Image (spheres, coloured by chain):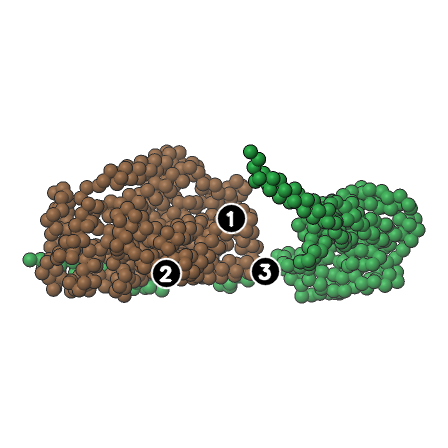
Chain colours: A brown, B green
Amino acid sequence: METINSASTEKLREFRSQIERPGMRSIIWIIFLTLLILWGIYALYIQISGGHVVTGMRDNVVWGIYIVNFIFFMGISYAGALISGTLHLFRTSWRKPVIRMAEFITIIALFIGPLYILLCIGRLDRLSFLVLFGRIQSPITWDVIAISTDIFGCLIFLYLSVLRDIAALRDFTELKIPKWRKKLYRILALGYTGTQEQQVRLKRATDIMAGMVIAIAIIVYSVLAWIFSVTLQPGWHSTIFGPYFVIAAVYSGTGVLIIAMWLFRKIYHLEKHLTRKHFINIGVLMLVLAAFFGYFTFSEYLTKWYGSQKNDEQLIHLLMDKYFILFILSNYLGVLMPLIVVGIPKFRTINMITITAVVVVIALWINRYLIVVPTLESPYIPIQDFRPEWISYSSTWVEWVLTLGGLAAFCLFFTLGARFIPIISISEDQDRKGEIL
Amino acid sequence: MKKPGINISLILLIFTLTITGLSAQNTEPADIYLEFSTWKYNDMSRSLVVKISAANDDGEFFLAGTLVKFFVVDRENELAIGEAFSGEDGLAVLNIPDATVTFPKDEDGYIYFIARFEGNNAFLETEEELLIRDVVISLSFEENEGEKLVYFEGIIIGPEENWPLADDDLFFYIPRMFSDMKIAEGWFEEDGTGYIEFPTTIIGDSLGKVLLISRLEDHYDYGNVEVSSEINWAIPKKLLTAEGPARELWTPIAPLWMIITLIIMLSGVWGHYIYAIVQLIKIRRSKK
């Protein structure tokens, strides 16, 4: 039994240039991203040396765009897990060119997201206390357990998914790569040669992990939502926050997946693999999620508005006054655009669906901002040492540069990941032809 | 050589200008409609309100940005008291604080207001008159053997003497989210006084306070007169709190159900992880 055959050899030749040496454009892109990350590191230095006063966070608005980025990246990570797990488990016929990107999104976002939590913490030297003195009653402890469990599960799932591709790369003799990379492929391939026993074991493990990552993604993102909803804060104390967060996560992740598909299609000329059909299929998923997201959002705000509790009223007033434009962008444009663009057949072009995905991703980021900041700007008063300037949040350049740095790191890891393993799964393609498994 | 094209252009230009000129001459100013009313409030201030509308083939529409001048008539003389532009809703409002203007009255106590639009290219000059008597309403509150009574008195202010406001309705409201809710109707007796019982089912704020508004509405003789007062006779709005120990989640020791649930879930998840890792180890061992 061989790990590569004529079909996969042809495919490996197609992706050879991506894997062997980066072109000038790639080098410039990588340098650009690295510079952005370095700028972020400089901002982090300013924050650590100057203290959190260099950010817009204060005693009452203790969370700002860092936590928004955390929720956002964790959201797209869970979306990647849900999409790749579901596509794998149900053997969806069109999954092959999409599934690897979804897996990449899962892992990379899962590593970047929690970094923003660290940026929120004033005393990083006490980080170990979370484990050493962790209390099961604390939602923060739930989140630490949940995220670490999720990272571990997603890493196993990704490894299982790429194992056959790594084995194929190891056996592809035409590949001109440094020795250390060849050695790395050899180690990571675990001696997989595609025997009947290996195939059965791999399939069994991958199927189980595909199911697990779906369940874990739902649970972990619900835990993240519960951090907010178990408090009595206006706008957060909601029983539907768990499913609302999960829907919002998958919705934003779908948007990111479409953007990634569009970019890789353009850069690596994958027109043959990523067709209009793939964009429409993911676009329809985005449409359904848009409807669910709109429904949850409406339900959430309607009940708060109708309940007319003093602090809820204060929050709704803030959203309709100070944050009116953002509210409309997030909850109207972000919901209606996919419904119109994907819903009406003549608008369903690759570019239009991608533009919609960009709008959705921005809208969902704003949605998380509107969940976090206005609530903290609506505290229960009287409170100890109340100062009006402490209940108003305005993000600073330090926060924005670190946000940009995280985004750059996401793009950089994606780029480097695509240089290490083909962005289109080779082994999944073999499955289609029935040559393996 | 003469270019015939120029002549044709010239003729077309003259023709167009002639048609345009004739069209302009045929456009006559249209009618405009004014609806004039007045409001008097607690602090004795008064608002003069004019709703301006016009009509075309599509129906009636409000006119925004239209200047309306207000006058009060003293015998035969018109005294200008102010002017206001209409908003998008067609309303031009002149607010007159107490004691800034003394309104002349006739011997029966009537004040004669005029609202005037002076006309422009599009609309004809129009004016509307309003004849009203100045009224003062006062409220007082008395609680007697569990009954909560709101007493009211109305006085018509004349040029030299005052008269009781008699034989008329006075409506009572409390503000709610979209509009004011009517809670009672009172009646001015011959002596200008009356009372209502304050309802026992009204819910106020956390201290039981509620704003009580009494109003004479669109009266042919007095216009609109509104008097309001805050009173703590309503039922206080209270949030119900659970009895017994609350928020046990935050006790020093985690509840048993939480520990058991967590152990079951984590064991299930990590068990599957271990199974997958074992499969990978077996793949490694089975290499040829």
Q: Pick out the residue farthest to the front.
A: B1
**Viewer-nearest of discs 2 and 3:** 2
B226 on left or right of A153 = right
Residue at 67% x, 63% y: name it: B202
Q: Which residue is mark 3?
A: B238
Q: Which residue is mark 1?
A: A325
Chain on which label 3 sits: B
**Considering depth in this image, is B255 or A212 the residue closer to the camera?**
A212
The Cα–Cα distance between marks 1 and 3, rounded to whole angstroms, is 34 Å
Chain on which label 2 sits: A
A99 on left or right of B42 = left
Picture coordinates of residue A164, whole percent (x, y): 17, 56
Q: Amino acid at mark 2?
A: Leu
Whether labels 2 and 3 share one chain: no
B242 on left or right of B25 = left
Crowdedness of circle 3 by 10 Å Cα count: few (<14), some, many (20+)? few
Tag 1 secondary structure: helix
Residue at 68% x, 44% y: name it: B18
Crowdedness of circle 1 by 10 Å Cα count: few (<14), some, many (20+)? few
Q: Amino acid at mark 1?
A: Ile
The reply to whether residue A304 is visible in this rendering is yes
The reply to whether residue B251 is visible in this rendering is no
Q: Which residue is mark 2?
A: A285
Q: Quadrant of the C terminus of chain A?
A: bottom left
Q: Pick out the residue farthest to the left.
A: B288
The Cα–Cα distance between marks 2 and 3, rounded to whole angstroms, is 45 Å
Residue at 13% x, 61% y: name it: A198
**Considering depth in this image, is A224 or A141 the residue closer to the camera?**
A224
